[in-house]
Amino acid sequence: MVRLYLLFKYSLTFVLFSNALIINAQSDNKKELLQQSKENLTPLLNSKPEKNNFLKYTLKNKKIDLKTPSNISSPKIDMSNQEKFINPGEFYTSKLNRKKGEKNKNPNNFKNDMYLGDFRTKEGFVNIILRDHEYPDGDLIQIKVNDKIVIGSILLEERFKSLNVELEEGFNRVDFIALNQGESGPNTAEVKVYTHSGILAGANRWNLATGVKATYIVIKE
């Protein structure tokens, strides 16, 4: 019985001693592996600051050139096509010259009726525009169609005036009768006749003494 006890005691002591040796060996192996891992690690951040050669070169050795590039030129201003304004002096001088031109005309040379022309149309109206093409001096005219008064009296001015004339079937005689000669010479006018659709059918000018007429013939088909 005593022998069995001693045998058990020695066996237990041997087992405990063996386990202690194994644990100690494992601990030493872990320390060696940890040390090797630390030695093999590459640092993520560089502990030594790097020199910025670019900044050093720029700030110390190179000055920034702020001059304007030589290939840029200022645009040239072209004054040749600028808007032209009317000279008031020239405008009124032109009007006075036109007035003098009318005074130099002899009304006795304009006592013959004028035939302005004829044309045909299928439309029911014609549009007549007329004005004083010389110096506006109070010229008055009367307009008749087939001897019927359409406009009793109209003052001719520098700007065109417009009127529509209704046509009869067949022959239409349109007369422009000078009622006076204004203040400075014969009755002067420019007249244009358009069809109702806007086609220019006739264009004329006249110089008429008082009572003399200018005539268009319009044939409505």
Image (cartoon, rainbow, N blue to C red):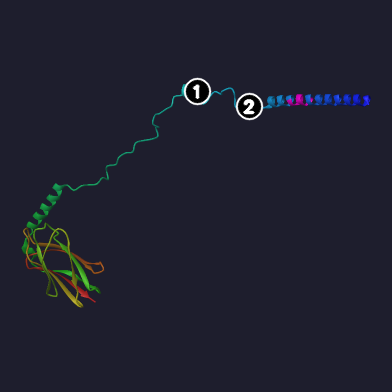
Q: Residues within 10 Å of mark 1 (few under 14, many from 20)?
A: few
Question: Of helix, strand and loop, which one carries label 1?
Answer: helix
Residue 18 appears left or right of 62 = right
The image's mark for residue 38 is none
Question: Which residue is located at x 76 percent, y 25 percent?
Answer: 27
- Residue extending furthest toward the bottom: 169
Rendered residue at 21%/75% (across/down): 219
Which residue: 83% across, 25% down?
Answer: 16
- Residue in front for this viewpoint, 147 or 164: 164
Q: Position of residue 147 (x, y in %)?
A: 12, 75
- Quarter-wise, where is residue 194 in the image? bottom left
Task: Report which quarter residue 131 is drawn in.
Answer: bottom left
Q: Position of residue 67 (x, y in %)?
A: 39, 29
In the picture provided, is 73 more to the left or to the right than 113?
Answer: right
Q: Alpha-carbon distance for marks 1 and 2?
A: 27 Å
Q: Is residue 1 above or below residue 148?
A: above
- Quarter of the image with the N terminus is top right
Kind of residue at badge 1: Lys
Along the viewing direction, whichever of 23 and 105 lies nearer the viewer: 23
Sequence-wise first label, 1 or 2: 2
Q: Which residue carries the number 2 mark?
A: 43
36 up-or-down from 94: above or below: above
- Name the side, left or right, on which 44 lies relative to 14: left
Label 2 crowd bin: few (<14), some (14–19), many (20+), radius 10 Å: few
- The residue stretch that appears in magenta: 25-30
Tell me the residue that label 1 is attached to: 56
In the rendered image, residue 197, in percent from the top left (x then y), is placed at 26, 68
Amino acid type, callout 2: Pro
Q: How far from the left and from the top, in percent, is residue 203? A: 20, 65
Q: Is residue 27 magenta?
A: yes
Residue 154, magenta (yes or no)? no
In which quadrant will I find the C terminus?
bottom left
